[in-house]
Image (cartoon, grey):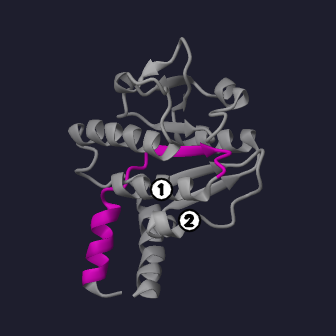
Amino acid sequence: MTPERRARLLAVLNKRQSDLTVVLENVFDPHNIAAVMRTCDAVGVQEVYVLNTKIPRHKKFGARSSSSAAKWLSVYQFTEAEACFSALRQKYDKILTTHLSSDAVNLYDIDFTGRIALVFGNEHAGVSDEIRAMADGNFIIPQVGIIKSLNISVACAVTLYEAQRQKKLAGHYDTCRIPEPQLNELLEKWGFEEEASS
């Protein structure tokens, strides 16, 4: 790896946020997943959890809409909700789902400066009852139109950019937040990907 490539990759890794993640529950369309991954990369989310309890495990994600974002992310696939949540609880203090309910909090009232996981449900049914019961609460994106839902990739983008806004104000992008062992591992993996794609 050339010094220039190393510096470029480190510049991106130093902005990665180790305390924010996205969980996608039974999302059918791989292009929706790919679009979410592209947004994750854009705001510095490194880890994405893909939970498939009702549909087959995804073999690949839509490369066209992701611009190959998946190869720069750490993607974990689960087929059991309990195993997924066990992994999440080891790293994140709060797990919130997107769901229209009487107890849902407004997106803009969430404190994104803590260790938080955000769960987005599938295109038809949203987040399942099972997952909502396992989470710590629900949130909604305020809307004033007739249709009260957004496409999953749009909803995720709106949410992550609010998180980025708060984290930037809190100085989270000013210092590296990824533990050194993980940083070195990603740098090595990314260096290989960079060389393979050039």
Q: Residue at x 43, y 43 (%)?
A: 154
| Residue 166: image location, x then y, percent | 28, 35
- 35 in relation to 3, above or below: above
Q: Residue at 69% x, 60% y: name it.
A: 58
Quarter of the N terminus within the rendering: bottom left
Residue under pointer 2 = 62
Magenta region: 4-28
Is residue 175 found left or right of 70 in the rendered image? Answer: left
Q: Earlier in the sequence, mark 1 or mark 2?
A: 1
| Amino acid on which disc 1 is placed | Ala
Does the magenta-highlighted stretch encompass residue 51? no
Q: Crowding at label 2, few (<14), some or many (≥20) Cα neighbours within 10 Å?
A: some
Q: Is residue 93 above or below residue 15?
A: above
Give the numbered dot on residue 35.
Answer: 1
Element under disc 1: helix
State the residue in front, 120 or 181: 120
Mark 2: amino acid: Gly
Marks 1/2 in contact by CB < 8 Å: the verdict is yes
